[in-house]
Image (cartoon, rainbow, N blue to C red):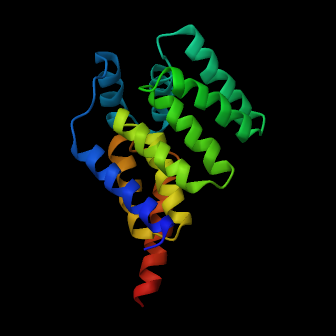
Amino acid sequence: MSNRNRIINFSVAALCACLAGPVLAQTAELDQLFADLAEAGPEESARIAAQIGSEWSKSGSPAMDLLLRRGEDALDDGNPMVAVEHFTALIDHAPDFAEAYNGRATAYYLTGKYGPALADIGTALQLNPRHFGALRGLAIILEELERPESALEIYRAVLEIYPHAEGVTEAIERINITLEGRSL
């Protein structure tokens, strides 16, 4: 088995363990936001998802929040390697902060480093199993690595958490068409 397949298999196994395991400590506010997200219509979903993202980005430390913002700014500025440096520093100082791993996973993905991106997604999901952004990132990578069945499973998991996630229903339809074409 190639290294790439080992990394993918590890990441999918870690994801399954995260989805099957208990949700780690969450605030009552987040629990309510997730309940609202599950019931919201398409027009309200993005607003609620943004509120959830805002809650997730609170590290509890102004210094760590600054590192997160610097990493996010570097991504916005098209500098994923600079973002990796900021997110790595954040992880060094706050190793239980899921947003740091999710941010670094995005930066690694943008540089084509799928192995490290998958490893960081796995950690983000261990820390925050309801992280629909990390799940979506995993599905995108799996789809690009030509693992449509696994990507489809993950996209469906995203919809269980965030029923109106932008582009996910279309991704599921696209994969279903691809898979139907294979079986013909």
Q: Residue at x 53, y 56 (%)?
A: 140
Percent x, y of residue 34? 34, 30
For the N terminus, the image quarter is bottom left
Q: Residue at x 50, y 30 (%)?
A: 99
Quarter of the image where one finds residue 127 = top left
- Is residue 145 rendered to the left or right of residue 108? left
Vertical comparison of 36 with 167: above or below: above
Q: Is residue 67 visible to the viewer in this orientation of the structure?
A: yes
- Residue closest to the far bottom: 184
Percent x, y of residue 33? 36, 24
Vertical comparison of 102 with 168: above or below: above
- Nearer to me, 120 or 56: 120
- Is residue 14 rendered to the left or right of residue 47? left
- Nearer to me, 142 or 67: 67
Q: Residue at x 71, y 40 (%)?
A: 80
Quarter of the image where one finds residue 55 = top left
- Is residue 82 rendered to the left or right of residue 36? right
- Is residue 145 rendered to the left or right of residue 67? left
- Nearer to me, 49 or 19: 19
Quarter of the image where one finds residue 164 = top left
Q: Is residue 151 visible to the viewer in this orientation of the structure?
A: no
Percent x, y of residue 152? 40, 62
Q: Residue at x 62, y 46 (%)?
A: 108
Vertical comparison of 157 with 86: above or below: below
- Nearer to me, 180 or 4: 4
Vertical comparison of 83 with 154: above or below: above
User: Number of numbered discs present?
Assistant: 0
For the C terminus, the image quarter is bottom left
